[in-house]
Amino acid sequence: MLLLENVKKSYIEPNGQPLPILEIPRFELSDAEQMILIGRSGCGKTTLLHVISGISHADSGSVQIDGIDLRRLSEQGRDRLRAEKIGYVFQTFNLLPAFTALENVLLGMAFSGRGTDRGRAIQLLERVGLAERMSHKPKTMSVGEQQRVAVARALANRPRLLLADEPTANVDPGNQQSIIDLIRQTCNEEKIALMMVTHSLEVAGQFDRVERLDEINQLSKVTS
Ligand SMILES: Nc1ncnc2c1ncn2[C@@H]1O[C@H](COP(=O)(O)OP(=O)(O)OP(=O)(O)O)[C@@H](O)[C@H]1O
């Protein structure tokens, strides 16, 4: 469902020099496959998730989702593909501050163009332990609670691929496990492929496929 071939990505440093981050010859994720991506801080994990989701562009190479090459799509087409096929739990949550937890999840559904399902939104928020917090706005919620809203929102659209950037970084161990269980169970039931970044060995240890970005990324092999 996901195929990367010869993907390269650099940033431009303030002095104008390119800062190469990714050089990935080939990477595949099958339908409904669940995997963990690990790697040292700053090695490019978030950058890779951004490139896969089309939030930022690879400098060269191809990223294919369900056989669709992101390069062949317009900006609008990429937005539509992301809305229809990808759920994304951002490291920084990206919740809309003017809206309640429930509205944030419903708005995520509305953007997909498939209509909203209030029952599912409520059920997901209940399952991340926020039954009592649905009408709270982000600024009145703890960081961990906001993170859980972000997880519910990312799953709401029944995506084909869930990209989760450290979705349990700010929650206590009890909530950590319930979020992992919710993500995995929903992905299993709805045949959603999962790529999750974590620094937690406890979380990584629960998955059959754990990839080190340093191993996939030619650049790290050369420079390390
Ligand atoms: N917009 C940007 N412009 C320039 N450099 C950037 C930009 N975004 C990220 N970087 C740099 O690219 C490198 C990779 O960043 P990235 O956020 O992908 O790492 P990461 O592996 O997700 O790190 P962490 O585990 O700390 O979240 C870092 O050195 C970072 O400083």
Image: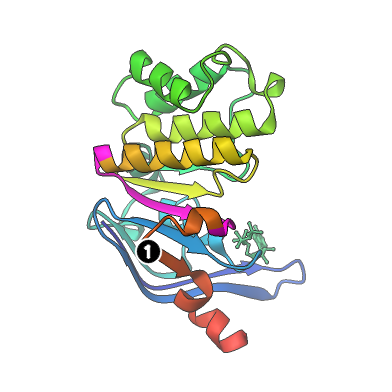
In the rendered image, is residue 46 in sight? Answer: no
Q: Nearer the viewer, residue 222 or 191?
A: 191
Q: Which residues are magenta?
A: 189-201
Q: Quadrant of the N terminus?
A: bottom left
Q: Residue at x 46, y 64 (%)?
A: 58
Q: Is residue 7 left or right of residue 131?
A: left
Q: Residue 17, image x and y in percent?
A: 69, 75
Name which quarter of the figure residue 109 lies in.
top left
For the point 43% across and 55% down, the residue is 206
Depth check: give the residue in front, 83 or 57: 83
Residue that carries the numbered disc 1 in the rendered image: 209
From this viewpoint, which residue is outermost toward the bottom?
A: 222
Magenta run includes residue 63:
no
- Tell me if residue 100 comes above or below residue 80 in the rendering: above
Q: Is residue 70 above or below residue 216?
A: above
What is the three-letter code of the residue carrying label 1? Arg
Drawn side of residue 4 relative to residue 43, left or right: left
**Does the rendering let one see residue 208?**
yes
Q: Quadrant of the C terminus?
A: bottom right
Q: Quadrant of ligand 1?
A: bottom right
| 223 sits to left or right of 49 | right
- Does the Cβ of the disc 1 residue fall within 8 Å of ligand 1? no
Residue 172, image x, y percentages: 64, 38
Residue at the right extreme of this rendering: 15
Within-10-Å neighbours for mark 1: few <14, some 14–19, many 20+: few
**Figure label count:** 1
Could you tell me which residue is drawn at 46 percent across and 53 percent down? 196
